[in-house]
Image (spheres, rainbow, N blue to C red):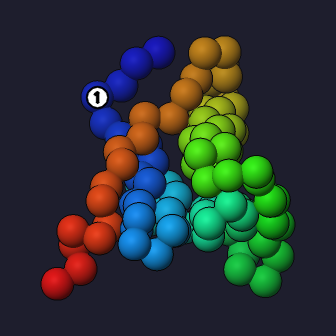
Amino acid sequence: MSNNFNTHTIKNFPSKKRSVLARNSDGMLIAYREGDAVHSGEDPRDMSTRAFMDHHHAQKFLRGLADRDQQRIMHEAGHSMVGVTARIEEIDGDRMIV
């Protein structure tokens, strides 16, 4: 199933070695990366943290979280999860800072 809209956004801040992952449908921040660690969860008091060897693997994990989030959304809506992936827009957050 393909779509013509982005389901998630990853905003990268290279100068801060940070990225944030948000769900576009409700604007919810669902994970963020600081250096080589990823913090995930919708409730800030209950976030889990995973450490990676480098920021490339951490960034890849963020993208996987978006895929799993989109699969969950499709499953809850009664659709098949087979082949479902998130459509992610990546934004350079450093360019947004004035």
Observer-nearest of 52 and 19: 52
* Residue plotted at (45% across, 48% down): 8
- How many other residues sit within 10 Å of disc 1, few (<14), some (14-19) or many (≥20)? few
Q: Is residue 1 left or right of residue 63?
A: left
The image quarter containing residue 65 is top right
> Residue 98: in sight, yes or no?
yes
Q: Furthest-left residue in view?
A: 98
Q: In which quarter of the image is residue 71?
A: top right
Q: Is residue 63 above or below residue 75?
A: below
Q: Where is residue 15 in the image (x, y as percent from the top left)?
A: 40, 72
Residue 70: give x, y in percent of width and height: 59, 38
Query: Quadrant location of the C terminus?
Result: bottom left
Mark 1: which secondary structure? loop
At x 81%, y 66%, the residue is 49
Say above or below: 78 vs 10. above
Circle 1 sits on which residue?
A: 4
**Image position, residue 89 (x, y; %):** 35, 45
Judge whether 48 appears above or below 44 on screen: above
**Left or right: 58 as drawn, with respect to 6:** right
Q: What residue type is labelled 1?
A: Asn
Label tally? 1
Vertical placement of residue 12 versus 54, above or below: below
| Residue for point 51% across, 68% down | 17
